[in-house]
């Protein structure tokens, strides 16, 4: 490969494999987009054959884009998680994934209950977490689709299984934020909803965080909670413009990784994602230089996922997930 660049494989900190087929769905912002597209397509994933086929195509396309690790949302169905990990294991990829926890405010076929969500997640953790290169993420979709009881159970699951991940969404869209405030009026702010249930800390990673306040960013920094920056999704849904320079401010840097957020995001390619990250940063007065951008897609994302000892750079002892461009 003498005329090529050999890089560590790209790392995608937040994406939804069941949504690949609704990529580019027209015309709605977050809540309507979920109702009209995501929640419709996700209902097919109780069928293992459908889920396996979708996982196979998703991981093939992920690798084709140069991404060797992703943190992935499956659907509420256990079968969707088994299918994903089976294919990930077959490819010997280091991936993170988990079953969605959702017990309210979504179509009935996509709902579990606090107890069922707990039991099924626990069984999946026992089956998949640490098996080969597979890692499990406890995955409450976001605060509005989980009851207080389910949030409590998610916190319990996470503390009972050290080394597992916690992934969710935060402060993506103004209507979403107003809704969450109405559902959890007693909490100080959006991040505090998750904090209250023990869902912040190392290996917790939240998608978006566009509209987090200074005190919330401070708390992310203090707790070691990561943010997945999803610029193609943020532009596509009109959610806003994440201020990367501010999030990484040297007085209280937050662990920020790069992410596609497909299917609201419009590309699995981390290069395309960086293209948009550059523009999002520019709109906030922060010119993202090439070295920072490369870092964001590789070691920066590994740090956001607490995997920098294993992936994200090329060095002795690291896992050799190499990308040839
Ligand atoms: Zn997402």
Image: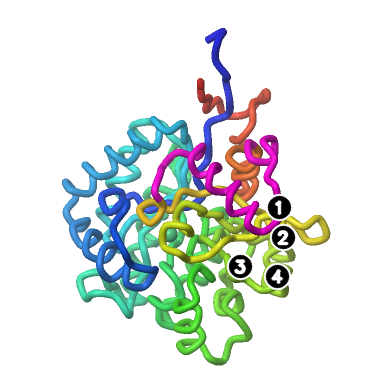
- Closer to the camera in the image, 48 or 143: 143
The CA distance from mark 1 to mark 4 is 23 Å
Name the residue beneath numbered marker 3.
200
Q: Position of residue 257 (x, y in %)?
A: 59, 49
Q: Could you tell me which residue is drawn at 42 percent across and 57 percent down?
A: 236
Query: How would you classify the magenta stretch by its main secondary structure?
Result: helix
- Closer to the camera in the image, 276 or 96: 276
Furthest-right residue in view? 251
The CA distance from mark 4 to mark 3 is 9 Å
Q: Secondary structure at mark 1?
A: loop
Q: Position of residue 35 (x, y in %)?
A: 28, 71
Q: Does 325 lie within the magenta span?
A: no
**Magenta residues (range):** 266-294
Q: Does 291 lie within the magenta span?
A: yes
Q: Answer whether labels 2 and 1 touch (C-beta < 8 Å).
A: yes
Name the residue beneath numbered marker 2.
246
Name the residue beneath numbered marker 1.
286
Q: Secondary structure at mark 4?
A: helix
Say the numbered circle drawn on residue 219: 4
Q: Earlier in the sequence, mark 2 or mark 1?
A: 2
Q: Earlier in the sequence, mark 4 or mark 3?
A: 3
Left or right of 50 on screen, residue 257: right
The CA distance from mark 3 to mark 2 is 20 Å
Left or right of 111 on screen, residue 11: right
């Amino acid at each position: 490969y003498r005329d090529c660049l050999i890089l560590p494989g790209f790392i995608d900190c937040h994406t939804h494999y069941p949504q690949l087929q609704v990529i580019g769905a027209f015309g709605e912002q977050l809540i309507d987009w979920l109702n009209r597209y995501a929640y419709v397509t996700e209902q097919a994933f109780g069928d293992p054959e459908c889920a396996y086929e979708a996982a196979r195509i998703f991981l093939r396309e992920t690798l084709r884009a140069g991404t060797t690790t992703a943190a992935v949302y499956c659907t509420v169905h256990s079968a969707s998680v088994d299918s994903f990990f089976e294919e990930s294991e077959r490819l010997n990829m280091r991936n993170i994934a988990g079953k969605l926890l959702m017990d309210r405010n979504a179509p009935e076929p996509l709902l579990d209950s606090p107890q069922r969500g707990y039991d099924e997640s626990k069984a999946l953790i026992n089956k998949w977490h640490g098996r080969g290169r597979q890692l499990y993420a406890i995955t409450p979709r976001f605060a509005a689709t989980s009851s207080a009881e389910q949030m409590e159970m998610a916190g319990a699951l996470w503390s009972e299984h050290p080394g597992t991940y916690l992934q969710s969404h935060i402060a993506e869209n103004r209507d979403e934020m107003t809704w969450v405030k109405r559902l959890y009026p007693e909490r100080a702010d959006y991040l505090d909803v998750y904090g209250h249930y023990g869902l912040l800390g190392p290996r917790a990673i939240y998608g978006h965080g566009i509209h987090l306040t200074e005190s919330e960013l401070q708390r992310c920094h203090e707790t070691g909670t990561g943010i997945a920056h999803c610029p193609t999704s943020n532009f596509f849904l009109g959610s806003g413009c994440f201020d990367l320079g501010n999030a990484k401010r040297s007085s209280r840097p937050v662990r920020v990784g790069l992410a596609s957020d497909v299917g609201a995001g419009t590309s699995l390619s981390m290069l395309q994602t960086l293209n948009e990250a550059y523009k999002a940063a520019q709109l906030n007065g922060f010119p993202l230089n090439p070295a920072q951008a490369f870092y964001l897609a590789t070691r920066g994302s590994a740090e956001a996922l607490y995997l920098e000892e294993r992936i994200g750079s090329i060095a002795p002892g690291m896992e050799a997930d190499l990308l040839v461009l």
